[in-house]
Image (tube, rainbow, N blue to C red):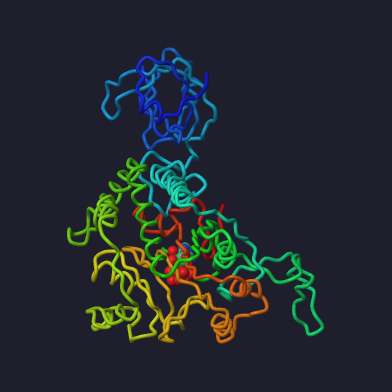
Amino acid sequence: MRRTEIKAILSQEEIGAEVVVKGWVRNYRGNNFVMFVALNDGSSLQNLQIVIDNEKFDAQLLKKITVGSSLSITGIIAKSEGKGQSIEILASLVEVLGTANADEYPLQPKKHSLEFLREIGHLRFRSNTFGAITRIRHQMIYAIHTFFNERGFYNIHTPIITGSDCEGAGEMFQVTTLDLKKPPLTKEGHIDFSEDFFGKQTNLTVSGQLEVEMACMAMSKVYTFGPTFRAENSNTSRHLAEFWMIEPEVAFADIYDDMDLAEEFLKYLISYALKHCREDLEFLQDRLLQEEKSKPEQDRSMPLIEKLEFVLANDFQRLTYTEAIEILKESKPNKKGQFKYDVKGFGTDLQSEHERYLVEKHFKKPVILTGYPKEIKAFYMKQNPDGKTVAAMDVLFPQIGEIIGGSEREADYDKLYNRMIEMNIPTEDLHWYLDSRKYGAVPHAGFGLGFERLMLFVTGMGNIRDVIPFPRYPKSAEF
Ligand code: ATP
Ligand code: MN
């Protein structure tokens, strides 16, 4: 007989039907006569209750049923008398697929701290919290592809190994097969990368944008969704060394189209989560409410689902960087010196404390900032007529700060080339990028959404290390 998933059994409630279920024991209890096992197979947050009549089975077999062990159960679906579940399985056949030594198994049927779960990252999929996050993460990946597919975008696989060190010099992980103890040297005594695997110096990509722009100049609407790597030493709850990024790029589009797309995209994803991940979101919401119980009422955050609905119900506040700087300069925390970094005026690079002030305290809704000083933004952004700012846009979210960074791109060859020279960007390495401004250049715009930042927002989790299966961050590449 084929295995039925627990989710299907719980939703269909076919009383009297015989089924085979397989999964892992989350908990068990019982007495001399009967044993109740809570079985989970990942298909649902809910466990399925298995009722085992001790008399019918070998005592040695039943002893092997411990927390963490895996079982195959054949039985009949019955109405449950007990509270906590409406149906249960009356077992007729019990098979222990894999035992789990009770003295060693680190997960107990109780609440573990997120820090502890991170230490046992290889097992944390078996916790309710990480199971919920895993299901939501999957639904969000699916929703992202659905959103773009419905709108005629093509998915482009951009390279993970890159030969152009232009975006984040110094923040990249180098890829090499050279012997680090005895690297080949040039006559001048430098490392001779012509002997390296690719015949030149290569790194892990920090963004797929430059390559996806090339596809955009033929396919019109494209996006890349891949892993990106940053060797920045940011030990924060919002930075990873390896994270996933969604980068759409649209031809014949300007900065306003870009903002519209970003807002529509985020709202689509949030509403998708509310529709398709209700049970897991409710679980995470309860978890957060429990955690905040001890806080005074005015310090508690909005319940998760309410927060998600709130974002859907409101237009994002759009304003210029220059306007935002004025608000921040005049703000109470700035005047009282409560920001870690003072806001001095035009040119200040906004920190997440400033971004969060605008979103959480001033506007009380998501914010899109445009027109950043060109000095603090990348070389490829479209230069505004004022000569000072570029057509950049950042989307700022509560609890997170920057969730999206994007821009209209500079489509004019001369302006782009001159900016690259000014910023010491190697134009020879990027000859191919410049080509796109030589041959049929058109206005185009795009952005990058950090997938784990989205996950932070949707799940309400506080640390980015808890929304990716195996986090990589400074001094940690476990598992
Ligand atoms: P931040 O200022 O927060 O470090 P950034 O300006 O470096 O972000 P971009 O280079 O614009 O970010 O990258 C685009 C998006 O990728 C960001 O809006 C954010 O959502 C995400 N992102 C950037 N760096 C990280 C990181 N280290 N870990 C996870 N997500 C990140
Ligand atoms: Mn950064």
**Could you say where residue 266 lies in the image, as x and y percent from the top left?**
37, 57
Taking the view exactly as shown, the residue that stands out farthest to the right is 187
Instruction: Count all numbered tags in the image, as a single digit.
Output: 0
Q: Is residue 172 left or right of residue 202?
A: left
Taking the view exactly as shown, the residue that stands out farthest to the front is 440
Viewer-nearest residue: 194 or 47 = 194
Q: In percent of the image, x 39 and y 21: which residue is there? A: 89
- Residue 366 quadrant: bottom left
Q: Is residue 336 visible?
A: yes
* Rendered view: 146 above or below 91: below
Viewer-nearest residue: 447 or 331 = 447
Viewer-nearest residue: 379 or 303 = 379
**Could you say where residue 300 lies in the image, as x and y percent from the top left?**
22, 58
Q: Is residue 21 left or right of residue 354?
A: right
* Rendered view: 477 above or below 305: below
**Could you say where residue 37 lies in the image, as x and y percent from the top left?**
39, 27
Taking the view exactly as shown, the residue that stands out farthest to the top is 56
- Residue 76 quadrant: top left
Q: Is residue 76 left or right of residue 229?
A: left
* Rendered view: 228 above or below 277: below
Q: Is residue 119 visible?
A: no
**Could you say where residue 335 lies in the image, as x and y percent from the top left?**
24, 84
Taking the view exactly as shown, the residue that stands out farthest to the left is 297
* Rendered view: 373 above or below 358: below
